[in-house]
Amino acid sequence: MNLRHTLRLLTLTALVVGAAVVFAPNNNKVLAAETKQPTKPAEKSSQTSYIYTAQSGDSYTKMARKAIQTYGKKSKINISQAGIVFAETNMTIQAGSPILEIGQKVEIKESVVKDWADKALKLTDAEKSAWNYYVQFVNFNTDRVGVAG
């Protein structure tokens, strides 16, 4: 069984049981798994969201990357590139790794971005080192992601 198949299987399993899974790139280990309990609907809370429109070449991962970077700038926190890759990967998995269609609107709640940004800031040096391997494959310029035109 290859890594992609294993991650997809774990993701699907997590979605079925309602768990949020945090993956580590080294040894394909699950770092943490937490099951969310049902909560009461919020009463008209005006939660901040990042809203993007899918363009050719966009993906949910790229939009998650842009949301993390935007949140970092807005909150004046410095998230390492390894931390960004960690957060975007886990946000994408948590969202169900959606395939986007051109023109599709994507909303990413700031509370989700904040949660993963906070976790990214708490990565150990060893975890950062493991995630840093993937940095070389990532284009961090997200200026055109989710922007029509």
Image (tube, grey):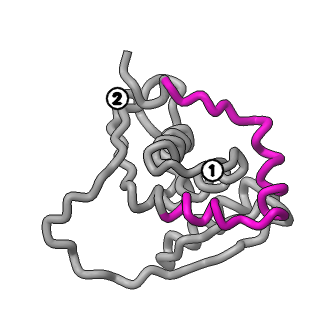
Seen in the image, is 110 located left or right of residue 17?
left
Q: Residue at x 51, y 31 (%)?
A: 58
Q: Residue 39, position in %: x, y?
A: 30, 81
Q: Secondary structure at mark 2?
A: loop
Q: Is residue 97 above or below residue 22?
A: above
Q: Is residue 11 magenta?
A: no
Q: Residue at x 77, y 53 (%)?
A: 131
Seen in the image, is 126 located left or right of residue 38?
right
Q: Is residue 113 above or below residue 53?
A: below
Local packing at callout 2 (Cα closer than 10 Å; few below 14, some 14-19, many 20+) is some
Q: Residue at x 43, y 45 (%)?
A: 74
Ranked by sequence position, the earlier of labels 1 and 2 is: 1
Q: Nearer the viewer, residue 60 or 16?
A: 60
Q: Residue 149, position in %: x, y?
A: 38, 15
**From where the camera sits, is residue 99 visible?**
no
Rendered image quadrant of residue 112? bottom left
Q: Secondary structure at mark 1?
A: loop
Residue topped by disc 2: 103
Q: Residue 11, position in %: x, y?
A: 60, 65
Q: Nearer the viewer, residue 7 or 132?
A: 132
> From which residue to which does the magenta span run?
115-143
Q: Is residue 137 magenta?
A: yes
Point out the residue furthest to the bottom here: 37
Residue topped by disc 1: 79
Point out the residue furthest to the top here: 149
Seen in the image, is 5 located left or right of residue 120?
right
> In which quadrant is the N terminus drawn?
bottom right
Q: Residue 129, position in %: x, y?
A: 84, 55
Is the magenta region chiefly helix, strand or loop? helix
Point out the residue furthest to the front here: 76
